[in-house]
Amino acid sequence: MVIRPPRNAYPNDAGMTETHNIGGIQVVEDNFVIKNAKQERLHCCHMTQANLDEGTQRPCVIYMHGNAGNKHEGKSLAYRLLPIGVDLLAFDFSGCGNSEGDWVTLGHKEVDDLKAVLNHLQQKGKTSKVALWGRSMGGSTSLRFDHTSSPIPVSCMIVDSSFCIFKEVAEGLVSKMMPGMPPEAIM
């Protein structure tokens, strides 16, 4: 249940582009797929203001979901971000939602997924800087990410309900599933 949580899949929306009115602003929602370093397909959603001048760069919040979540977890943030001039990109970590991959590692390999997203934004050239917003596993990913190697400046992080030491998480889970097991026998 930890490294292979139930998939929170949804109807395939890859390639779909929709327009919404959010706070009086026309917003384009672009759903697409990129590949991570392992060539696994990651499902992404980028929301930005429609009809921007060519060459306009905007800040972007990258939302990273928790274990057993998906990109839809972060889409509700669009109603707060787009009206203040901030884009939103949410994606499914590998092994989650509709993305490829067989398991999650609670932040370890998910860092590579975040790198792929940052590289995508850098290649598009429409993002000036990013804020990383992670919940649980997404927060752990943000904490593990080497911000000095980011192709786009990381201006801040919002880390919600995360953990920083995986060994403590594993010991806690095993002690609940196997009462009486000494912690030294776990790792």
Image: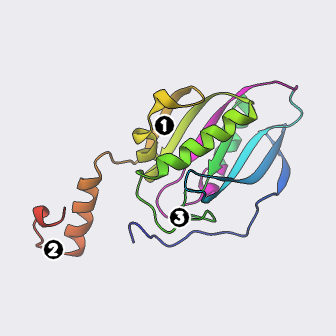
Please report the residue visible at 10 percent of the width from the left and 73 percent of the height from the top. Answer: 180
Q: Which amino acid, mark 3?
A: Gly
Which marked residue is nearer to the observer: mark 1 or mark 3? 3
Please report the residue visible at 55 percent of the width from the left and 49 percent of the height from the top. Answer: 113
In this picture, is 95 found above or below 61? below
Query: 137 and 114: which one is in front?
Result: 114
Q: How many marks?
A: 3
In this picture, is 98 found above or below 155? below
Query: Based on the displayed image, in which of its 4 quarters is residue 184 positioned?
Result: bottom left
Please report the residue visible at 61 percent of the width from the left and 62 percent of the height from the top. Answer: 99
In this picture, is 128 found above or below 79? above
Residue at numbered disc 1: 158
**CA distance for labels 1 and 3:** 23 Å
Q: Which residues are magenta?
A: 53-75
Residue 120 % position (x, y)? 67, 41
Residue at numbered disc 2: 179
Residue at numbered disc 3: 95
